[in-house]
Image (cartoon, rainbow, N blue to C red):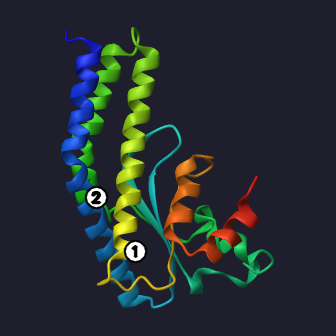
Amino acid sequence: MKNFDDVAEDFVQQLCDIEKLLVQTIKFEVKNSIDKIKSINVDLYGFAILPGDCCEVGTLAAAYNLESDIKNEYLEDPIYYRYSVDEWENYDHSIFARSNAILEPCSEELQKILNIYRDDYDEETAGLQGDFSDFIYSAVLSALVEYRNDPNVQSGNIFFAIWIADSSNEIVDQSIIELNPESVSKIFFSHFSS
């Protein structure tokens, strides 16, 4: 059996090898998805990437909301219903098929490593899981920043987020700050700060 440190180093190298391809693929899939949504529904105002839950990251999905999705009964707290991705109407698990195909071998490799080494290297395997999550968060954020800054893209006033339900993960706040105008970030944080 290989030494855990060597296995972990090989896994991290595997992530580095796919990083650029993953970022470009996510950006491509975001653009295609938003273009498709906007061609049917011109009132798109929010788009979020969901990288998994707080305990298991590895498969990307999308959520989006339209102005017409905000129902009259939500008017008592319109900011909450506008910016809380948990309350949005539209979820799509097929948008990121190519990106998820890139991530799948890494997820499988990580699972193998955990199965073999978790008992003897519990703390280290947890760290490796954290590295994988951070890698995905970074790739998603980079893709969204590139999309947002692309002069050929008409992203307009779309609210963007990386969203992890029921989580205080710092990537959520970081994405709100980096992907949205300061005025939108201030509204978000004034309403959702703990």
Q: Which quadrant of the figure contains the N terminus?
A: top left
In the figure, residue 33 lies in which quadrant? bottom left
Going by the numbered disc 2, the residue's amino acid type is Val
Look at the image and tell me whether residue 193 can be seen: yes
Q: Decide which of tag 1 and tag 2 comes sooner along the chain.
A: 2
- Judge whether 42 appears above or below 159 on screen: below
Q: Is residue 90 visible?
A: no
Query: Picture quarter containing residue 62?
Result: bottom left
Q: The residue tagged with tag 2: helix, strand or loop? A: helix
The residue tagged 1 is 148
Q: Which residue is mark 2?
A: 23
The CA distance from mark 1 to mark 2 is 13 Å
Query: Residue type at mark 1?
Result: Arg
User: In the figure, residue 128 lies in which quadrant?
Assistant: top left
Question: Is 165 on the left or on the right of 20, as rendered?
Answer: right
Residue 65 vertical placement versus 97 (above, below): below
**Which x, y percent locates residue 73?**
75, 79
Q: Residue at x 28, y 52 (%)?
A: 100
Q: Position of residue 173 (x, y in %)?
A: 59, 56
